[in-house]
Image (cartoon, rainbow, N blue to C red):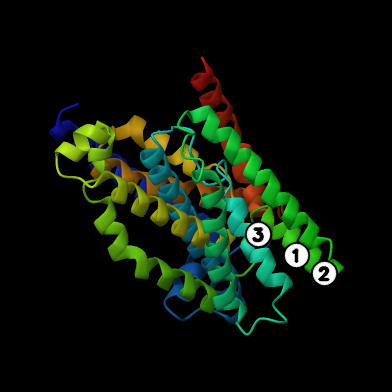
Amino acid sequence: MTNLKRKHRFGAWFAGLLVLFVLLSFFQMTHGSIHLSLHNVLTTLVGQGDAQSQLILLQFRLPQIMLSVICGGCLALSGAILQLVTENPLADTSVMGINAGASLGAVIFLALSHYINLTQTIGLPLFAVLGSLLGAAIVFIQRRLQQPLQLLLIGIASGTLLNGIILLIELQLNQFDFDKLIIWISGDFWNQDWSYIFVLTCAILVILPFMVRQLWGSDLLTLGQQSASSLGLAVRNKRRNLLLLAVLLAGIAVAGGGAISFVGLMAPHIAHSLVGHKSRYYLPLTVLIGIDLVLFAAIVAEVVFAPSQLPVGLVVAVITMPYFVILLLHQTN
């Protein structure tokens, strides 16, 4: 594929995915247990809506859209970085135990919140990030595990171990906290407070310069360690920094929406199939695909099964699991 053709394809797909995001956002704002007309939505967005529309839109539906953007974008980009660093097409934060580590950190904070002098708005993201670092350390300390299936197995084993610890902690909680954590761990936008969303957004903005710097020149990693080193790339430092970036993004995503699985596995593969493997093209599409996927799952979870509401993570798993199975079978052949 020539650069000009790839650029045109990128522009077309980027515009299409952006339009899809706008359409899904308006559908999310207008549909639900209480229907809002497009006129109500538009007037509320400009500050002239009635009290009911303001409550529904500003306190429930817009926060859900923002959390879909945060979780979907962070998970998709984190998965793309993991696949690049490990040279493993099966790499994903959920498969490799990083999500489980982030969930463990969050559960520990919630269980000890009465004894920790931190607000939930600050403490939960912080402990989720620390937990994601723990989950990543358990997997990547095994440096000899270079084969995709080996890395997959150790990731699943560490995730199972961490989830077992989470369950032990949950059993010590009261019924109310236990029920809340079960729903959150299955993947749910449980905290839709604007101050919490603001903290998550600030965390992304803080690591944004680091993100841009580390992704610059990351295409050289696809050439192999020897070739990349001969071109002046500090391969070991680049891989370590990119891995840290992936873990930070996963921690932020889990803090926002719980342990949503396989977004980071599916989105990069779709982006690769659309525009190839140049990071300047496939990474922006990866982020948009992840956002659209999580937002679509949020709509299905809330609208299709209304008045009941499913956890978003459960819907995402149903959508993405067949793709994971197909990819896994392809790797074993």
Q: Along the line of sight, which residue is nearer the eye, 21 or 101? A: 101
User: In the picture shown, does residue 225 fall above or below 297?
Assistant: above
Q: Position of residue 267 (x, y in %)?
A: 44, 40
Q: Earlier in the sequence, mark 1 or mark 3?
A: 3
Q: Seen from this angle, which residue lies furthest top?
A: 333
Figure quadrant of the N terminus: top left
The CA span between labels 2 and 3 is 18 Å
Q: Are marks 2 and 1 in contact (CB under 8 Å)?
A: yes
Q: Are marks 1 and 3 in contact (CB under 8 Å)?
A: no
Residue indicated by mark 3: 104
Q: Is residue 105 visible?
A: yes
x 24%, y 45%: residue: 280
Q: Position of residue 259 (x, y in %)?
A: 61, 53
Residue indicated by mark 1: 180
**Mark 2 residue element:** helix
- In the image, taking residue 108 as reference, residue 1 lies left or right, namely left
